[in-house]
Image: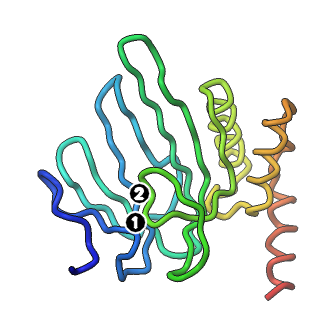
Amino acid sequence: MTGTAPPRVGGGPVPSANSSDALTHVELTWIENRIEYWIRFGRQAGDRILDRRRRVVSFRPGAIFAFVRWAANDFGTVISRIDIVRAVDAGAAYQTLPFVRPGGEILLKIEGWPKVEKVLLHIDAVEAAGVDPCDVAPDHWRHVTHRMNAGHEPRSYTFARHQAWLKRREIEQ
């Protein structure tokens, strides 16, 4: 046995959790008005098209990305979710997440379209402040999760807050 998943129809194998490469792979699907999985932000290390509706994007260890999942059936929305995840090093501990292989460190997990939409607006505000969401302090995404789950508004991530994070990270190294 080679340790890879069996070939998938129309696109070849998707790397399994025990794959030897050090990348984190995210399978994206787009079936208009049914299943829409996409990356809101993240620096991709690779992108592979499986078929006209599916592709796999890959991230290097340490990369932070936002994975949005939305699905519906004939009766309405079935799932609305956003996860902000940090890709982990090979052999490091991780949390499992559907469609993310092997998994990652989940910094933010929000479910339900109204809350997901607020997170997307928060990401827009971070970008408007001149900060790439990939570079935001991981603790800020945890803060957003906890504040929203408690029914409160998260604090804004300002350019000044970002500069403080960069200095703190510099000192810690």
Residue ID for mark 2 = 26
Q: Where residue 160 sits: x, y (%)?
A: 86, 59
158 up-or-down from 82: above or below: below
Q: CA distance from mark 1 to mark 2?
A: 6 Å
Residue at 79% in and 73% down:
166
* Identity of the residue furthest to the bottom in this view: 173
Q: Amino acid at mark 2?
A: Val
92 up-or-down from 154: above or below: below
* Nearer to us in this view, 135 or 58: 58
Residue 43's label in the rendered image is none
99 up-or-down from 90: above or below: above
Quarter residue 87 falls in:
bottom right
* Nearer to us in this view, 7 or 35: 7
Residue ID for mark 1 = 58
Where, quadrant-wise, is the N terminus in this rendering?
Answer: bottom left
Marks 1/2 in contact by CB < 8 Å: the verdict is: yes
Q: Taking 102 as reference, is 33 left or right?
A: left
What element does badge 1 sit on?
Answer: strand
Q: Mark 1 or mark 2, which has the lower sequence index?
A: 2
- Other-residue count near label 1 (Cα within 10 Å), few / some / many at <14 / 14–19 / ≥20: many
